[in-house]
Image (spheres, rainbow, N blue to C red):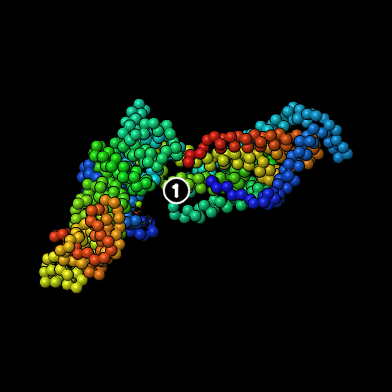
Amino acid sequence: MKRAGFTTRWLPILLLLPQLLIIAVFFYWPAVHAVQSSFFLQDPFGFGSSFVGLDNYRDLAGSGEYIKIARFTLLFTVLVTFFSLGLALLLAVKADNVIRGARSYRTLLMWVYAVAPPVAGFIGLLMFNQSWGPLTEMARAIGWDFKLGVNFNDTATAMVIVSVWKQVPVNFIFFLSGLQSIPKSVREAALIDNRSAVGRFWDVTFPLLAPTGFFLLIINITYALFDTFGIIDTLVKGEPGNNPMTLVYKVYVDGFRGNDLGGSSAQSVVLMVLVLALTVFQFRLIERRIHYT
Amino acid sequence: MAQISLQNLRKIYPNGFEAVQPTNFDIADGEFVVLVGPSGCGKSTLLRMVAGLEDITEGSLSINGRQVNNVDPADRDIAMVFQNYALYPHMTVRKNIGYGLKNRKTAPAEIEAKVQEAAKMLNLVEYLDRKPSQLSGGQRQRVAMGRAVVRDPALFLFDEPLSNLDAKLRHQMRIEIKSLQRRLGVTSIYVTHDQVEAMTMADRIIVLNGGQIEQIGTPAEIYHAPASTFVASFMGAPPMNLVEGRLDTGQVMIGDGIALGNAEGTGPVTVGIRPEDVELNDQGSLMFTVDLVEELGAHRLLHGRLAGQPFTVHVGKEVVVGAGDAAVNIKPDSIRLFDVETGAAR
Ligand SMILES: Nc1ncnc2c1ncn2[C@@H]1O[C@H](COP(=O)(O)OP(=O)(O)OP(=O)(O)O)[C@@H](O)[C@H]1O
Ligand SMILES: [Mg+2]
């Protein structure tokens, strides 16, 4: 590959500066701040803070509630990731087989992509409305008295459904383009080698989609962990009460509702470490495997 | 081993384009048939219909007397070699070659034995554990061949398998494929737009043009007795010279009353003369004006004009000529006549 170079040293720095500045102001500075305040106990009225060392972390590890929320977050992430990827893959495979009217199907499936999380949450609220939500009525038809915001499991179900619904289009687009980048002749060769469509999918199509799938796996885990905040906040109408919540939502509730800045900072540091681990994992695996050509 | 029979096989694509007009031919057991024609003439479409990768619009296709129009590609007992090889990029060479066998419920030990045998035949033994991305173009081509050979199918289908190789490798693989086919005796259909491949490999050549068969015949028949001006100008490098002439008083005439030979009839006619059927001869009765000499080592091509019309003459390396006029003779009985309107041979 040819490397293009700048003739002056200052131009590249100047061009990078706005981006670096944004990262510094909105990421590094708050991150450093969070790490710092996680070692302090804030006065609830904002009059001062005292150094408490690792107490905030010890509290977290000892808190039954925190562990419970962590467990729920894990389950939530697994479910959202699994169903978002699974459904999207199914839809992509079907859409890829469609020849006539393919464009309109694809456009319809991609629309949800443009919906912002809180809007998705709001649509979820409407769909699960206690008295006239169509999904509530559907649940009732099979004898399930669905109570969003009241029953823990029902609320959790709604959160998973809305989060999956919001994420499927993104995955769909990636899977579809992944499918379409598999050379036609490779699939035709498989058609001659294997009469079973299911066999062909698992032996040829799926492995060739693996790079896309792995990339999406990381994206989806990150989405389920962090980006579902808006959906959750809308679905519980800002009133967590006994409703399920994820670790990120807990950071917000403790920090801004409970004014426990120290504890909340400790929680964000835990999440930062999680993201870091995910990123390292991703880079490692991408370097190692899943490159075919 | 198989005989293939195409009856009125026709392809109309969903957009209404008729890529293959109703086509009839039979292929004998063990025969090597080459489909040749210019780009877009429907060669691949025809081959893909035989493979089952493209629906047959009309007509009937039989392999060994069994109609297979609606049989899945995997159940037609065919193997195909694609232009870009279509290897499975995530599988090793061993798995690529063995994949078709695995899906046909062959025992693992038998698969391994057959893969080894195919690999030996194609000099691939040391590459069995590599992925396709770690192979050269020629090696990939061999793997694609291995994948076809290992299944011992009734019919080989090749769609321009050599067009991605350089000239030297192409020449070598041409010979290898042909001798492999001889040895295995598997009926084969080979698609190419390269007339040299067609001439050298085929038992029989089918020349296609615009979705229609122009001629079916052995390489010698196609070369010496082309059925139309299209075949005459497509087969042979350089192609047959085609000059405007007329029939008059039992003679073939070109230019201002230059007689080339005897033929019945009257009126205008297209006269075809192979470049190598013309000899330079001081006593020659025709005057050929050489404009350009193309040096090809073993021989030379003289491009110029005969009776005012573009003309090419093929001479041996020992014949030294420069630009200018030269007297030539046309070998007796080497003149082909074609209808001016239809282009068909007369
Ligand atoms: N899916 C399709 N829909 C409509 N027309 C098609 C389709 N596929 C091919 N064609 C047309 O059918 C004709 C024959 O195509 P085909 O691929 O058989 O040509 P070919 O002889 O193999 O040419 P080449 O030597 O370039 O491979 C072409 O004119 C092509 O444009
Ligand atoms: Mg083709």
Residue B153 picture location, percent across and down? 29, 38
Local SS, label 1: helix
Residue A268 picture location, percent across and down? 73, 37
Q: Residue at x 25, y 57 (%)?
A: B320
Amino acid identity at mark 1:
Asn
| Quarter where residue B85 is shown | top left
User: Would the CB of label 1 be found within 8 Å of ligand 1?
Assistant: no
Q: Residue at x 71, y 34 (%)?
A: A270
User: Looking at this view, is B195 or B309 the one in front?
Assistant: B309
User: Looking at this view, is B187 or A287 the one in front?
Assistant: A287
CA neighbours of label 1 inside 10 A, class few (<14), some (14 to 19), many (20+): few
Answer above or below: position of B169 versus B291.
above
Can residue B216 be seen at all in this image of the molecule?
Answer: no
User: Looking at this view, is B31 or B334 the one in front?
Assistant: B334
- How many numbered marks appear? 1
Q: Residue at x 78, y 29 (%)?
A: A54
Residue at the right extreme, as displayed: A47
Residue at the bottom extreme, as displayed: B256
Image side of residue B67 versus residue B333, left or right: right
User: Looking at this view, is B218 or A30 the one in front?
Assistant: B218
Q: Residue at x 69, y 31 (%)?
A: A68
Image side of residue B286 versus residue B19, left or right: left
| Quarter where residue B326 is shown | bottom left
Q: Chain of mark 1?
A: A
Residue B264 picture location, percent across and down? 11, 67
Residue A119 picture location, percent across and down? 66, 50
Can residue B275 be seen at all in this image of the molecule?
Answer: yes
Answer above or below: position of A109 versus B287.
above
Label 1 sits on residue? A97
